[in-house]
Image (cartoon, rainbow, N blue to C red):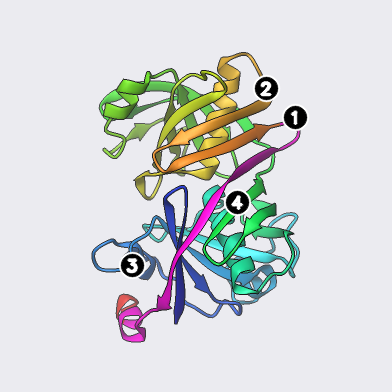
Amino acid sequence: MSFVKGHGTQNDFVVLPDLDARLSLQPDAVAALCDRRRGLGADGVLRVTTAGAALAAGVFDRLPDGVAAGDWYMDYRNADGSIAQMCGNGVRVFAHYLKASGLETADEFVVGSLAGPRPVVLHHADADTAEVTVEMGKANRFGTGSAVVGGRSFAGLAVDVGNPHLACVGIDRSDLAALDVGAPVSFDSALFPDGVNIEILTAPVDGAVSMRVHERGVGETRSCGTGTVAATVAALANQGADTGTLAVHIPGGEVTVTITESTSYLRGPSVLVARGELSEVWWNTAHA
């Protein structure tokens, strides 16, 4: 059972090639695989398959809107084994893997997800590194909310990027660095009944913001692709703008996000770190 380990701005994933979607990704097994002591360790798992194969295997009951049966499909699982609609950093790593492995020869193609189709452009890709732009779709605001992170209360903008976010603008850089983002969080459960990813970020200065994120089902991660999009929407709104481009600095590096009237774009790096084989005995035991 082969795997690849990769990351996008240090948001790391185990990539599982499974073109026929035959693997059983039970939550307990995914959680064990993502555990940094008893498994390989990762923020999530990316199953590589096609939308048609995933449909036939019962991964979902119908194709996601806008996704064709022949499209590549990123079946993304959080570190706790739960299913997630979308992951911007994961799409970059997924697309990089397809090109590096020879499964895809084009530099522009579509990656399907539960949140819909995500067109990608590979500006550069080799066996180890890539630079990828993902069209992330329209980011929609749906109100304001509040959360407690690291013992501090924050108000923020609710943003749907195919998954829910609360982006809170205004902390200064020194306080952001000291904040315990990994601590348990609380938030408006009425506004976010299925949980929420929470971004804490500085106001824009010279076209850039700094951000940290608490991802639902994971905790603090070094980066969150959809989170950088939500953060950019909130940072622009903080300046009275609906569109624009910002550099977003996260603990794992830097990405560039562009918001237009109709869609959004995320550009950043991908790194494929290792390739190997999972023990079948270990995998079967993890499912027990």
Q: What residue is drawn where x is 64% and y is 67%?
A: 99
Residue type pointed to by label 1: Glu
Between 273 and 86, the one nearer to me in the picture: 273
Quadrant where the N terminus sits is bottom left
Q: Which residue is labeled 4 in the image?
A: 131
Q: Is residue 232 above or below residue 226?
A: above
Residue type pointed to by label 2: Asp
Q: Which residue is labeled 2 in the image?
A: 242
**Are there few (<14), some (14-19), or many (20+) residues within 10 Å of tag 1?**
few
**Are there few (<14), some (14-19), or many (20+) residues within 10 Å of tag 2?**
some
Real-space CA distance between mark 4 and mark 1, rounded to the nearest whole angstrom: 24 Å
The quarter holding residue 148 reads top left
In the image, the segment drawn in magenta is 260-284
Question: Closer to the observer: label 1 or label 3?
Answer: 3
Q: In the displayed structure, does residue 112 sit left or right of residue 32?
A: right
Real-space CA distance between mark 1 and mark 3, rounded to the nearest whole angstrom: 41 Å
Picture coordinates of residue 167, whole percent (x, y): 48, 29
Residue type pointed to by label 4: Glu
Q: Earlier in the sequence, mark 4 or mark 2?
A: 4
**Are there few (<14), some (14-19), or many (20+) residues within 10 Å of tag 3?**
some
Residues at discs 1 and 2 in contact (Cβ within 8 Å): yes
Residues at discs 4 and 2 in contact (Cβ within 8 Å): no
